Image: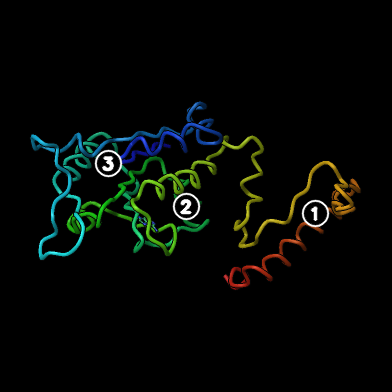
Amino acid sequence: MKIDILTLFPEMFDGPFSHSIIKRAKEKGLAEINLFNIRDWSAGKHKTVDDYPFGGGAGMVMMIEPIARCIEELRGKTAYDEVIYLSPDGKMLDQNMANRLSLHNNFLILCGHYKGIDERIREHFITLEISIGDYVLSGGELAAAVLTDAVVRLLPGVLNDETSALSDSFQDNLLSPPVYTRPADFRGWKAPEILLSGNDKEIAKWKHEQSIARTKLRRPGLLDQ
Ligand code: ADE
């Protein structure tokens, strides 16, 4: 899978993409993640990428020209399955959406900043708008890192244990059961006996019951879906 990310702040991805699962996915050649600085597509001498909004109002707006030039150049090389814009007014990211996106070959993610991007970019280039929650971030970069992580970890071969993404919370609309490790007894706080019993069938049954109980208690709405 190839993910091309357009941003004004490529350095913001240094941390999230250089460790753990995403790092391993890149090293194994399972995910190719490319960062493009939108400023490099600004034609002006001063490399301007934002301007005052028509009609007034607070904040700056990302200009159409550098973004259009950048997307058009990249589209000349790659047929994207989706051109995604991250925005609080997009469709809410959930596990279903991550699952679906993980089946794509290529997508482009545009990160907005300031007061947003010129609306004409959304009308003419964007095929999917995604929000990661009902709150406002300073820009799309953190949201892009969240989306990328949620998708890349689902690619076959990325996780060591192939089944482990399937047992994540939200797959099957259930939250995960609680987990424990050594010591079995810490200051008298004991791990459930059943998990130490070696009885795989009973353990699986217990985990499923725990999942259902936890979902009923914490996220009952998931059970209706
Ligand atoms: N950009 C700013 N806030 C955002 C959010 N909640 N989700 C996605 N992109 C954003």
Q: Is label 1 in a helix, a strand or a loop?
A: helix
Q: What residue lies at 31% left-to-right and 39% top-to-bottom?
A: 9
Q: How is the image coloured?
A: rainbow
Mark 3 to mark 1: distance in Å?
A: 47 Å
Q: What residue lies at 41% left-to-right and 50% top-to-bottom?
A: 143
Residue type at the position of mark 1: Ala
Residue 8, numbered label: 3
**Residue 14's quadrant in the figure?**
top left
Cβ–Cβ below 8 Å for labels 2 and 1? no
* Residue 32, position as x, y percentages in the image: 41, 32
Q: Residue furthest front?
A: 187
User: For the image shown, how many numbered marks are present on the structure?
Assistant: 3
Q: Is label 3 in a helix, a strand or a loop?
A: loop
| Between discs 2 and 1, the one toward the N terminus | 2
- Between residue 148 and residue 136, name the one nearer to us: 136
- Between residue 203 and residue 48, name the one nearer to us: 48
Q: Residue furthest left?
A: 45
Q: Which residue is mark 1?
A: 204
Residue type at the position of mark 3: Leu
Circle 3 packing at 10 Å, graded few (<14), some (14-19), many (20+), is many
Mark 3 to mark 2: distance in Å?
A: 27 Å
Q: What residue lies at 70% left-to-right and 65% top-to-bottom?
A: 214
* Residue 105, position as x, y percentages in the image: 40, 40
Q: Which residue is mark 2?
A: 100
